[in-house]
Amino acid sequence: MSSKISILITILLLHATCAGKAQDGLSTDIRLNQTGFYPRSQKVAVITAESPAEFYIETIGEKKKVWEGKLTDYRPATFTSKKTRIADFTSFQQQGNYRLVVKDLGFSHPFAIQNNVHEAVAKGSIKAFYFIRASTALTKPYAGKWARAAGHPDTKVLVHPSAASAQRKAGTIISSPRGWYDAGDYNKYVVNSGITTGTLLSLYEDFPQYMNAASWNIPESKNAVPDLLDEVLWNLRWMLTMQDPNDGGVYHKCTNAKFDGMVMPEVTKDPRYVVQKSTAAALDLAAVMAQASRVYRKFDTEFPGLADSCLNASTNAWQWATKNPEVLYDQNKLNAAFEPKITTGAYGDSDVKDEWMWAAAELYLTTHEETYYKAVAMLPDEKMPLPSWPQVRLLGYYSLARFSEVLTGKAKEDFPEIKKRLLQTGDDLTRKVDLQPYQTVMGQTAKDFIWGSNAVAANQGILLLQCYRLTKDKKYVFYALTNLDYLLGRNATGYSFVTGFGSKTPMHPHHRPSEADGIAEPVPGLLAGGPNPSMQDKCQYPSAVPDEAYVDNVCSYASNEIAINWNAPLVYLAFGIEALAGEGR
Ligand code: G3I
Ligand code: 9MR
């Protein structure tokens, strides 16, 4: 073969690879929600390679052409000059299973057009919480091929020297079973449990009818309680054990001294510790338990006394925090003073003003005592930070919005301003979406791409659903759906980020059981962290561009780990959109 020809062949092959056109005609340059679309919702794919402008939709079975259209003009991607175009087939409404074909490029992943198209992913993402339960065996009828032995019984947990008190000296053994593992690791952290559990309880409070009926085959499915509340209870019962009954203080975490290896839960036998009490942990627990008390009050027959226990835990934690208003968790400082050194996740929040606000709002809403509300500056500044583990201000605002009709006193006075700010924040998120190459709320700024960026997308979606609840303006559901589309494939990586949902999904998440169980498919329903150009894990990434900096490799805890505080907002967004199905046109 002449060298000219071989160069030509190489160029052609490279072109085929770069253009994402696989041999079988599947093109990874067609980015769309890989699960599908509601018949009457927006239907958009983004094409990330050059091609002729013609595209069509064909059925999966008979390959029958059912719709054709033209791509828009080229526009640059947000963070590169890569050319993108949009295929809009919104007006095609026929239910069925299809793929999108772009002339000379190839066909897309398959997708459905149907009612309830996100029900499966909603149920899958909450079922994931069953899969990450600590202290229990997962059995075949519920876990299928991912059945596994129990790990981390946590019935003999040591009080770490940093957490010692007169009544509970260092080395005292306490019991702290259950809860969800935090993430890819096997530790349990109160702060991260706080926002997670609060988000799931809010889903229940915002869509009670829908969530009363929804069920997804967990061991408690046959009892009289909605599955969502059964699942949440698994974690609530653990959280209650994290409170010291002697003073109401709350341990920051229940953890190994260092991370376990990449092994199944039952393999690891390292000692477990409860570590230092912190104000953030106390206030997060106070907020969650106040909300839980409201929610579980309706299930007094099934869980006698639970609502009261939650409220007691909440007020005791609040009182402890009042006496200890700014005990921060600083792991370096802790390790300078105590042995053994603790090197697991820190969740060290250096500003607890927002935790005060969240706890005050929830305690006020549950007890109707205005003293809680008035104890804290609820509008200390103009900021409206999107919820994340160190930023829970808006969780308080969402709850106030939920009960806006029955607010009293100062809360009633403040509410118009809170509402105005929520809507302003929602509007700011949506204003320029139509100009974005991926047509999503997510990813308009590089700042969206932090560790756990997929939770940014999901939390933006929740904020928009809150705006819908306040106004009944369907445009907010429309825009929330753009972020679900983002998470399920309409993004710069081409992945649907939820394991097992979509065609190109993470196969190697940084999740110990998924890595260690010998089963090819990871545990399903888990949301990967998502693009994160900071790449703190120092793994090999295919790109450092903000919205592309993702790698499906178990090494990558900074882009491909899973975590309860990322899955919970996905659960809310997917169920919320299902509950409102049809609103976002
Ligand atoms: O607070 C600063 C902020 O002021 C600054 O503007 C911003 C700029 O990037 O950074 C902020 O700090 C970040 C912090 O999260 C809060 O968002 C850090 O850079 C970032 O490294 C840090 O990442 C956290 C990571 O742990 C490392 O601590 C993630 O949010 C958090 O989700 C992750 O959580 C881990 C647990 O520790 C252990 N278990 C797994 C879990 C998920 O990976
Ligand atoms: O598995 C750990 C993950 O949950 C954390 O998010 C991450 C950052 O704290 O750390 C991971 O553990 C790694 C540790 O930090 C360094 N040695 C390798 C561990 C992963 O195998």
Image (tube, rainbow, N blue to C red):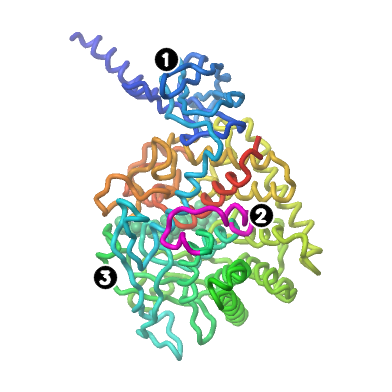
Q: Are marks 1 and 3 in contact (CB under 8 Å)?
A: no
Q: Is residue 382 above or below residue 468?
A: below
In terms of image quadrants, where is residue 340?
bottom left
Disc with the residue nearer the chain's start (1 vs 3):
1
Instruction: Identify the residue at horizontal 72%, vertical 47% (top origin).
Output: 424
The N terminus lies in quadrant = top left
Count neighbours of disc 3 (C-alpha within 10 A) and say few if under 14, some if 14 to 19, many if 20 or more: few
**Magenta stretch holds residue 545:** no
Amino acid carrying label 2: it is Met
Q: CA distance from mark 1 to mark 3?
A: 56 Å
User: What secondary structure is marked by label 1?
Assistant: loop
Q: How many marks?
A: 3
In the rendered image, the residue lying farthest to the bottom is 166
Q: Position of residue 338 (x, y in %)?
A: 37, 79
Q: CA distance from mark 2 to mark 1?
A: 46 Å
Amino acid carrying label 3: it is Lys
- Residue wearing tag 3: 269
Amino acid carrying label 1: it is Asp
Residue sitting nearer the eye, 251 or 211 = 211
Disc with the residue nearer the chain's start (2 vs 1):
1
Instruction: Identify the residue at horizontal 61%, vertical 33% (top origin).
Output: 41
- Residue wearing tag 1: 104
- Residue wearing tag 2: 384
Q: Position of residue 554 (x, y in %)?
A: 32, 48
Q: Position of residue 297 (x, y in %)?
A: 61, 71
Residue sitting nearer the eye, 512 or 99 = 99
Q: Is residue 399 above or below residue 61?
A: below
For discs 3 and 2, the disc positioned in front in the rendered view: 3
Q: Magenta residues, as a range?
A: 204-223
Q: Position of residue 207 (x, y in %)?
A: 62, 54
